[in-house]
Image (cartoon, rainbow, N blue to C red):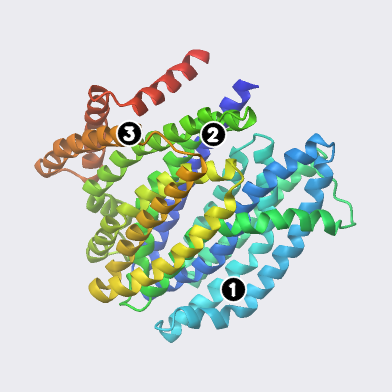
Amino acid sequence: MKSKLGLASVLFIGASLLLKVSGLIRDMVIAYYFGDSFVADAYLAAFIIPNMFILFMRNGMKNAFVPSYIDALDKQRGDWHLGQIFKGTIVFSLVTALIGVALAPVYIPLFYPDFSGEATDIAIRISAIFFASILFIGMNAVLESFFDAQNRFSMSMISQIIVIASSIGSALLFAERIGAYSLAIGYVAGTVVALIVMLSIVLSRNMMAFRPRLEWLEIRRFYWVFIPVALSAAIGQVHLMVGTMFASYFEEGAVTYINYAKNLVHMPQGIFGVTIGTIVFPLLSKAITTDDRHLFKRGIEQGLTSMYLILLPSVIGMLILMPNIISLLYERGEFTAEATMATTHVAYLYVGSVVFFSLNQMINKGFYSLKKGHLILVISSLSIGLNIILNVILTGWIGYRGIPLAASIMAFTYVGTQFIVFYKVVNGLRLTYLAVECMKITAATGIMAAVVYPLLHLMDWHHLTQIIVIALTGAVVYVISAYVLRSQALRFLLNHLFKTKRKA
């Protein structure tokens, strides 16, 4: 059993990396065909609102369905519960999709009043197409969560990769004829294909009881838990929508710079957050099962310091190489050198956002493990108001560059508040240990930066060669520095990897 879970974790991490890479390729395709034009702005702005509902369904379902399905499975009603939630979600998703499609001509001009007439028309049509996909996204979300409950974690990632790959393929085939609509149509086609793949597996193995009758009591009971959890999961997309709304008031290309910079800078969060969560989550689960609060708190501490250990040097290294990375990835086709520099300046200001929100992943795991998810929703809701206020102040000062700065300041305040509340809920953590460990990691990162930054300016090579050499040099210097400084987080990760290898 342990070997199967270990293999599932490895596949999940690999699929997560592939998903991030495929998302990056999608952005590269958009940059190639549309650069930083109003068409790119319209597409990216149009996607944000339906994507908020997509994340609402997908992430909320994972947090709510897995425990409910496991509970039903213990009562010998797993296939029946899956069937009821699947059918109930069809109704919920259909209503959401129809409302989203019908209201697109209303909310696009409302949220983006400074778009040109042509950009507004494009955004309305694209948003309506994406909302149509929510019918299939809802069903996909239930099946992805079912596979997670079966410890087949990579299936949900494969499903999302199919969707992104379909978007990319559609753009490559049809972008020159139908423009940005090709990406949206490809997205819908991908959701249908992913649904067919997963549904064929489930039905062929009789894993779901798909009877005509709907048990509304069972569905209402589930959605009573699902909705607040899903709202918490969608908060991040609300923050992105706020930033995009403010960016739409500025010159053409501002929305594009904001979205590309955010996606790129937050890549380490998606990749390493999954890795650390996979390593630490079994420790938290064991602690909750045995009601061992001491073990639970040690798990949170290990998660926070391990996240900081991997994330900080990754983000600082990216910042040092940012102009090279953006130029290598995006600067071709319609994406100019001027667009590269504008995106780079925005990326620099997002650094606080990615660091603090990544650390917050571990705090959120702690809240959900303790069944205190409602506290996350309350604090997250208040953070939206703070984000709006900061955007008003900072965009008035430095233009659209105030948007990522506002995100970083808001993230610091939001995560700080969550940490304080969590600290009180668990009756304290080892603050001295956390502070000392963070200082060691910060010092090791500073040594790494002091070595690689001058080295970068001595090299006049191709961007890819520079990135590889600097990344490898930085990694070696950082690991040695952290080891010499006796980082406990580094020792924890090395012990885990060594233990895993020895068991294998």
Sequence-wise, the earlier of marks 3 and 2 is 2
Circle 2 packing at 10 Å, graded few (<14), some (14-19), many (20+), is some
Identify the mark at residue 281; answer none if there is no mark. Answer: 2
- The secondary element bearing badge 3 is classed as helix
Circle 3 packing at 10 Å, graded few (<14), some (14-19), many (20+), is few
Residue labelled with disc 3: 432
Identify the mark at residue 128; answer none if there is no mark. Answer: 1
In front of the other: 65 or 133: 65
Position above or below: 26 against 201: below
Tell me if I can see residue 163 in this picture.
Answer: no
Identify the residue shown where x is 26% and y is 32%. 440
Identify the residue shown where x is 69% and y is 54%. 225
Give the side of residue 281 with respect to residue 327, left or right: right
Residue 343 on image: x %, y %: 28, 61
**Circles 1 and 3: CB atoms closer than 8 Å:** no
Alpha carbon separation for disc pair 3 and 2: 23 Å
Sequence-wise, the earlier of marks 1 and 3 is 1
Please name the amino acid that badge 1 sits on: Ala
Q: Based on the displayed image, in which of its 4 quarters is residue 89 positioned?
A: bottom right
Q: Based on the displayed image, in which of its 4 quarters is residue 496 positioned?
A: top left
- The secondary element bearing badge 2 is classed as helix
